[in-house]
Image (cartoon, rainbow, N blue to C red):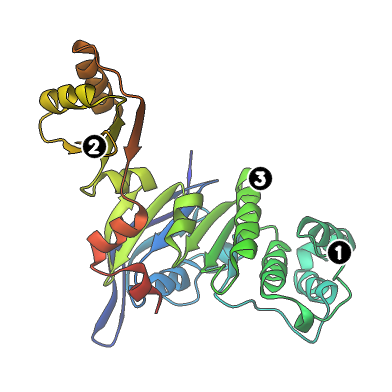
């Protein structure tokens, strides 16, 4: 799979304040890449550089195969961008907002009517198409904003905190839309303050703190780096619990629940070894569950901030 975005040694400063300090990124085409970090970490600056809105001070970046420094126009033609707040004209109807975007895109103007109709249907905005955007809910405005981004048929879309302020139902609707875009081959570069969102959507996650990437990998890979992963075994009798506790050093027992907590990295090899150990002593657990830290734990361990602090 080819890379949709590559960055090497990306740097950006404002006077004496270093905002991006040597960022390296590789985003595969047709995937969802999520950039996490506390406020002020440099997430929006990263997006602004990658989308050619501001110039980097150093490093090399290619987006859709084009160098952002020397081929900025080609980069802009290949991407779509939505910010933290829906960029719709509230005085226009939903249909008029979409038609405006079509009129501004000469390459798509000849198919304008078809494009507007298809986008209204795709984003479930047909019934509200003739209503002013000022009457739309927050979720509807975000859907319209994303629909407007798709007028240009971008293959890479930058979503800068696209669900901030939305209710849980609207947020999950946006998740489904994002998944559908990726199934069509679109690459998504997502920044978010909702770690559950990154966990649910992202193929790969990078954690940015004080202008530096402190971790990068799949959500599961990042979780396994944080201490606290364990296997919980539940037995049917105290005798079985006693026997298991004796053969599994370092485990912690709960006599009331008849459970044993066994430290583990959660990997296939260690789980197989644990099951073989139980089988060796003719022991069988009633239930067997793997518990791993979530991205909140990862975020706290890597940045020293909780998600609540980061979201302020």
Disc 1 crowd rating (10 Å Cα; few below 14, some 14-19, many 20+) is: some
Q: Of helix, strand and loop, which one carries label 1?
A: loop
The residue where tag 1 is placed is: 126
The residue where tag 3 is placed is: 184
Mark 3 and mark 1 lie on one chain; the one further toward the N terminus is 1
Which tag is nearer the camera, tag 3 or tag 2? 2
Disc 3 crowd rating (10 Å Cα; few below 14, some 14-19, many 20+) is: few
Q: Of helix, strand and loop, which one carries label 2?
A: loop
**Residue 55 coordinates in the image, percent (x, y):** 42, 76
**Is residue 74 shown above or below 229?**
below
The CA distance from mark 3 to mark 1 is 22 Å
Mark 3 and mark 2 lie on one chain; the one further toward the N terminus is 3
Left or right: 91 as drawn, with respect to 291 = right
**Residue 162 coordinates in the image, percent (x, y):** 56, 68
Q: Of helix, strand and loop, which one carries label 3?
A: loop
* Residue 87 - label: none
**Is residue 267 shown above or below 135?**
above
* Residue 265 - label: 2
**Residue 188 coordinates in the image, percent (x, y):** 54, 55
Please identify the quarter of the rendering in which residue 94 is found. bottom right
């Amino acid at each position: 799979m080819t890379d949709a975005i590559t960055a090497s040694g990306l740097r950006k400063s404002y006077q004496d304040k270093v905002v991006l300090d040597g960022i390296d990124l590789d985003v595969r085409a047709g995937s969802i890449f999520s950039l996490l970090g506390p406020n002020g970490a440099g997430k929006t600056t990263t997006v602004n550089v990658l989308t050619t809105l501001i110039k980097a001070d150093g490093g090399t970046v290619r987006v859709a195969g084009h160098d952002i420094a020397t081929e900025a126009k080609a980069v802009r033609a290949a991407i779509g961008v939505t910010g933290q707040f829906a960029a719709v004209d509230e005085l226009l109807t939903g249909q008029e907002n979409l038609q405006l975007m079509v009129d501004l895109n000469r390459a798509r103007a000849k198919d304008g009517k078809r494009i507007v109709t298809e986008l209204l249907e795709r984003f479930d905005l047909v019934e509200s198409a003739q209503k002013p955007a000022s009457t739309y809910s927050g979720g509807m405005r975000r859907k319209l904003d994303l629909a407007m981004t798709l007028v240009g048929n971008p293959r890479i879309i930058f979503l800068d905190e696209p669900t901030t302020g939305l209710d849980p139902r609207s947020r999950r609707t946006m998740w489904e839309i994002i998944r559908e875009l990726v199934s069509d081959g679109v690459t998504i570069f997502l920044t978010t303050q909702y770690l559950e969102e990154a966990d649910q959507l992202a193929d790969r996650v990078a954690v940015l703190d004080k202008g530096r990437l402190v971790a990068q990998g799949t959500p599961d890979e990042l979780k396994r780096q944080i201490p606290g992963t364990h296997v919980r075994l539940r037995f049917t009798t105290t005798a079985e619990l006693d026997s298991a506790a004796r053969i599994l050093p370092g485990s912690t027992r709960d006599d009331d629940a008849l459970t044993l907590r066994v430290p583990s990295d959660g990997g296939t090899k260690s789980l197989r070894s644990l099951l073989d150990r139980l089988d060796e002593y003719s022991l069988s657990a009633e239930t067997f569950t793997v518990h791993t830290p979530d991205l909140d734990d990862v975020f706290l361990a890597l940045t020293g901030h909780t998600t609540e602090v980061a979201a302020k």
